[in-house]
Image (cartoon, coloured by chain):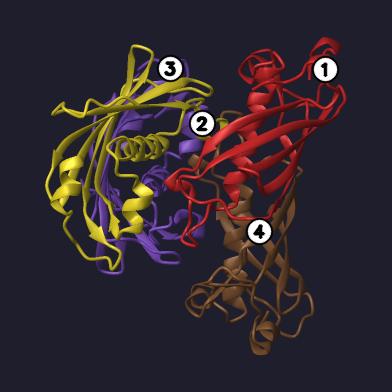
Chain colours: A red, B brown, C purple, D yellow
């Protein structure tokens, strides 16, 4: 994880080793797992920005996914070592749009995007404080 | 499941009871599970059209997901009884586009879409025989 | 679900249709899913005894798993229609032991057991009221 | 991973960072995930012994789980960094028994065991060659 805090397009990268349980009988990773990896990458992104997800939740900010999409280009297989690159695409005090690329070496396996709203623990929409937004 | 075989927009509906394991610590269903439900609905759709997924695989036709997206409108909770409505949106001999709506009673919880290519067991793109395509 | 409320060994049965996502590249159901099915069966057992799990949680009683075991005798496959039979093996005001049998028709696929403690929402061990215990 | 190749009780350790998707609405990791972590640890154990699981499968040896059990002592939480220690408990040409301990720092969260038979890709029981058995 080596974000450039000055870059407008910040990118954080994590490594994922494919679990046996993530495969299905087609012999590849079941597609739903990519969304779980996106979430891991998102958590790492928040960490790298000094906003650990765990602490955000403790402070009453949840980031439910309101839209998710992924384009699968090439299959992932058991035991593959993959990287997931995460970039912030858009931010407002009420929403975040985050992009992901799953790579196996130089090969792009999948790319996706999630859109989030900022929600309080009461289940209602809320807003980030300006200093939180700035960090993202 | 009561598809109208003459209808251009065929719809098949399944029922899903939310499992405890499908929730996360936010107290709602984790979003990745909706893609698993879509898959269950897709399998039921194929069954209803006289094309059991299991048999299609045995005959050498796989339908990997090459694109998936979902818009989450309202959370699903443990023990909810939901319905997933599935409709064919587009079909060619090489591709299928399928749409989904997850309902809790009259409330729309989520709507999504998946795009599939027809693949042989050798991992290469192939085509449906005309009589298979017709059934979809 | 047809428990005999007078029987000392109450049994509740649910049906599970194997999901594609539950398979792994061995071509069978990944073993961890059996524990998820046990949980579904446990929830159905509580329902049948007039103690919906959801309401128990709302009233402050959680039933975390403190021990789980399963013996896998024969594999389950995609699209199989299975039954899971659930029986109460032991009960005290502080603990429950529940047994499970996963069947495909007349064939026993797996049998398992879970042991639970009664926990309050504060994370501390607690006890069932006598009238709750009686129902189990 | 630093197994002692001379030790009768070989131990291999992996690190697991708890995923958000692994939690449930109780606020802890859902218990079924521990069996997935055991599997990751088992794969790492095989790697460390010079028997990558992927290659064993390619050579026609599968290691289905025929028995699994776990005792959960203390809950795991989102974002926890855990270690899973894996030890071979018994080996024959037809079976393996493997033990696991999940630790959070010095605290034991769970301990479990799995029992495996050696199976060929034809689904029939088979035996390890002596040189494979020796490495385990």
Q: Name the residue rendered at 38%, 50% in the picture.
A: D54
Secondary structure, mark 2, is loop
Camera-side residue of D22 and D117: D117
How far, Cα to Cα, is label 3 from label 4?
35 Å
Q: Which residue is mark 1?
A: A133
Secondary structure, mark 3, is loop
How busy is the neighbourhood of tag 3: few (under 14 within 10 Å), some, or many (20 plus)?
few
Q: Is residue D43 visible?
A: yes
Q: Which mark is residue B120?
A: none
Q: Which mark is residue D23?
A: 2
Q: Which residue is mark 3?
A: C123
Secondary structure, mark 4, is strand
Q: Which dot, 2 or 4, sits closer to the camera?
A: 2
Q: Is residue D11 above or below residue A30?
A: above
Q: Whole-percent x and y of residue C99? A: 26, 45
Q: Are marks 3 and 4 on the same chain?
A: no
Q: Which dot, 4 or 1, sits closer to the camera?
A: 1
How far, Cα to Cα, is label 4 from label 1?
36 Å
Horizontal side of B43 relative to A66 (left or right) equals left
Q: In the rendered structure, are the residues bearing label 4 and label 1 in contact, judged by CB atoms less than 8 Å apart?
A: no
How busy is the neighbourhood of tag 4: few (under 14 within 10 Å), some, or many (20 plus)?
many
Chain under numbered label 2: D
Horizontal side of A36 relative to B57 (left or right) equals right
How far, Cα to Cα, is label 3 from label 1?
34 Å
Q: Which dot, 3 or 2, sits closer to the camera?
A: 2
Q: In the rendered structure, are the residues bearing label 2 and label 4 in contact, judged by CB atoms less than 8 Å apart?
A: no
């Amino acid at each position: 994880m080596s974000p450039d805090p000055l870059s407008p397009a910040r990118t954080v990268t994590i490594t994922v080793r494919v679990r046996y349980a993530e495969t299905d009988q087609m012999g590849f990773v079941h597609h739903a797992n990519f969304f779980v990896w996106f979430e891991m990458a998102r958590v790492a992104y928040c960490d790298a920005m000094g906003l650990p997800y765990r602490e955000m939740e403790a402070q009453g900010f949840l980031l439910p996914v309101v839209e998710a999409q992924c384009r699968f280009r090439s299959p992932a297989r058991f035991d593959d070592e993959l990287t997931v690159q995460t970039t912030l695409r858009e931010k407002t005090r009420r929403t975040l749009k985050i992009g992901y690329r799953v790579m196996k070496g130089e090969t792009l396996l999948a790319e996706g995007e999630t859109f989030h709203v900022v929600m309080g623990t009461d289940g209602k929409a809320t807003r980030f404080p300006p200093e939180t937004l700035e960090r993202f």
